[in-house]
Image (cartoon, helix red, strand yellow):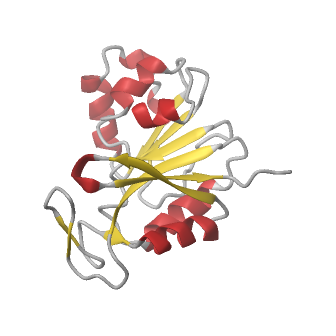
Amino acid sequence: MAALTAEGMTPDDHLLDIGCGSLRLGHLAVPFLKPGNYWGTDASLALMRHGRLHELSDPTRLPEDRLIEDPDFAYPGVPDRITLAIAFGVFTHLPAPMLETALTNLRRLPNLRACLFTVFLAPEAAAATRQPDGVVTHPDRPPYHVTESFAAATIHAAGFVPARKPTLLPRGQVLWTASPPQIP
């Protein structure tokens, strides 16, 4: 929530929580946002439904149709009115090409002003890399890492402007923002 509010999120925003799982962010975002302004995607619809029933103090604030099973980052049924997206701790569990797929498919959302996501970073050509908290990441198996240049190039290739945030997150994850280019 702190990263989203720092990005300017207000209750009027429409949030897409990519890889929302059992609503680890959703249980905070749903009460903050106006009813119906939260959308979640995950590979497991059952996990999202469980989170809706057990993590929200008022499940009626989150209509069940706002939870979309989406293992491919295709965002089926996600409306154009989305203004912010977040994928916290998602790409640390997936091969690097999935980041480009996820970002590229977000380009169809005309009102999106930013997508925040986290990755582990490692030096160029690094194999196993020990992160600040001791977790060992890899380029070819979970937990995955990427290079800073790969993250920036991937954001650019998807049609966004990259910004690495200074905030250090749990386990040494690095927060990035992908924003649409500004029209002069």
Residue placed at 31% from the left, 47% from the top? Answer: 169
Task: Give x and y (percent) for residue 27.
Answer: 34, 26
Q: Is residue 65 left or right of residue 51?
A: right
Instruction: State the image quarter where residue 26 is shown.
Output: top left
Looking at this view, is 6 or 30 the one in front?
Answer: 6
Quarter of the image where the N terminus is located: top left
The front one of 30 and 54 is 30
Pinpoint residue 46: horizontal percent, then vertical percent: 30, 41
Above or below: residue 31 compared with residue 99? above
Is residue 159 found left or right of 22 in the rendered image? right
Q: Is residue 172 toward the left or the right of residue 31 in the image?
A: left
Above or below, comparing residue 116 to residue 141 in the picture: above
Measured along the vertical axis of the image, is residue 55 above or below residue 147?
above
Q: Residue at x 45, y 67 (%)?
A: 98
Quadrant of residue 54 in the image?
top left
Q: Nearer the viewer, residue 101 or 166?
A: 166
User: Is residue 26 toward the left or the right of residue 127 in the image?
Assistant: right
**Residue occupying the far right of the picture:** 184
Kindly give the residue lying farthest to the bottom in the view shown. 125
Q: Position of residue 104 (x, y in %)?
A: 60, 63
- Total count of labels: 0
Outermost residue to the front: 166
Q: Residue at x 30, y 35 (%)?
A: 24
Residue 77: % across, % down: 58, 44
